[in-house]
Image: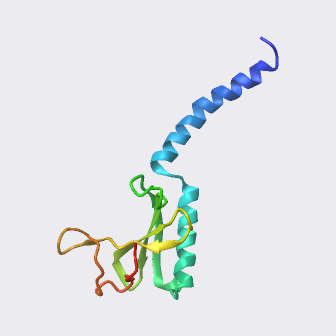
Amino acid sequence: MKKYNKPIIIALICFVVVGIPMFIYDAFHGNFIRDYLMEKQVKEYLTGNGYTEEGILSIEAEYNMKFNTNRIKGTFAYVVFKDEPKEKYVYVQWRETGKVQQECSYYSEDTGAFEAKYTQTRKHMIKNCY
């Protein structure tokens, strides 16, 4: 075997052993960089729309393969506001424009299911949600 073939073979083996499992994990679970970027973009969206950082209790991004469509990115964010600590608002990002928008569905304790209609009892729900 020639000397220059050995590094190429080692690089290919490393790619197969490390790269392919990482690609498969990313496809099913997402990665922390996308989660961080989504959290940052949702925070910018909220502060740009009149919310203060003090009014936001938490923003947690998560990847879901079911949300990953040709219109919506698979990483979405749960936002909890300080004045409604039991409510989680879901924010998604459009694939084409990159704009962040609130999703309409929420879990209703009354029905025990997800609802997708506008209600005024949720203080931070907007009318033109996705």
Q: Position of residue 74 (x, y in %)?
A: 47, 57
Residue 59 x, y percent position in the rendering: 47, 71
Residue 119: quarter of image: bottom left
In the displayed structure image, the side of residue 16 where residue 123 appears, left or right: left
Q: Quadrant of the N terminus?
A: top right
Judge from the rendering whether residue 66 lies leftward or rightward of residue 54; answer left or right.
left
Q: Residue at x 50, y 66 (%)?
A: 94
Residue 17 is situated, as x and y percent measured from the top left of the image, at: 58, 30
Task: Name the residue: 55% across, 41% down.
Answer: 22
Res 113 quadrant in image: bottom left
Task: Name the foreground residue: 115 vs 32.
Answer: 115
Q: Quadrant of the C terminus?
A: bottom left
Q: In the rendering, at what x and y percent does residue 54 appear?
A: 51, 85
Locate residue 26 relative to residue 103 in the image: left or right: right
Viewer-proximal residue, 92 or 95? Answer: 95
| Colouring chosen for the image of the structure | rainbow
When the figure is inspected, residue 24 is found, relative to residue 50, above or below; the finding is above
The residue at the point 44 percent across, 56 percent down is 69
